[in-house]
């Protein structure tokens, strides 16, 4: 009976650790440019910069934009021919640090990181 109880405890611990490791963490980043970022203006980032930041581009990703407490999910395109990751912002913002983008790897958890990409 004691062996079965210990087995149940170990099994529960393993299940708990697996469920915790499946939680997605995200990369937050800002895009540096010299002009105001306007709604509808596409932003392209070099794929090499994303790879160097540790973002796995071969797995499903989710891109969100956060500005002044509002959040929106964004569509993105990966153009492997031109080597770019492109998206279109949905809220007006400026380059003074109030617009953040969050990219989440939906299959593998990543450590939290903050990056600034040039475009």
Image (tube, rainbow, N blue to C red):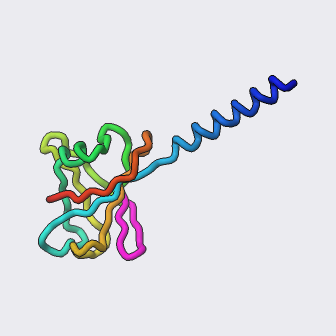
Question: In x, y percent, where is residue 46?
Answer: 16, 49
Foreground: 36 or 11? 11
Q: Which quarter of the rendering shows the C terminus?
A: bottom left
- Position above or below: 39 against 13: below
- Position above or below: 32 against 48: below
- Position above or below: 109 against 7: below
Question: In x, y percent, where is residue 99?
Answer: 30, 70
Question: As drawn, is 16 to the left or to the right of 111?
Answer: right
Q: How many labels does the image show?
A: 0
Corner quadrant of residue 63: bottom left
- The stretch in magenta equals 64-73
Magenta stretch: dominant secondary structure? strand
Question: As drawn, is 100 to the left or to the right of 6?
Answer: left
Q: Which residue is drawn at 84% across and 26% down?
A: 2
In the image, is residue 107 part of the stretch drawn in magenta?
no
Query: Residue most toward the right?
Result: 1
Foreground: 95 or 12? 12
In the image, is residue 70 part of the stretch drawn in magenta?
yes
Q: Which residue is drawn at 34% across and 53% down?
A: 113
Question: In x, y percent, where is residue 41?
Answer: 19, 67
Q: Which residue is drawn at 41% across and 68% down?
A: 71
Question: In x, y percent, where is residue 39?
Answer: 25, 72
Corner quadrant of residue 101: bottom left
Q: Which residue is drawn at 32% across and 65% down?
A: 100
């Amino acid at each position: 009976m004691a062996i079965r109880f210990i087995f149940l405890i170990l099994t529960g611990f393993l299940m708990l650790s697996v469920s915790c490791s499946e939680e997605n963490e995200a990369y937050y980043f800002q895009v540096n440019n010299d002009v105001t970022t306007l709604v509808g203006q596409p932003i392209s980032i070099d794929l090499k910069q994303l790879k160097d930041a540790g973002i796995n581009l071969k797995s499903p990703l989710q891109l969100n934009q956060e500005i002044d407490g509002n959040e929106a999910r964004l569509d993105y395109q990966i153009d492997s021919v031109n080597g770019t990751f492109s998206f279109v912002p949905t809220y007006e913002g400026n380059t003074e640090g109030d617009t953040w983008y969050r990219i989440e790897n939906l299959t593998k958890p990543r450590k939290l990181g903050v990056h600034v990409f040039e475009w």
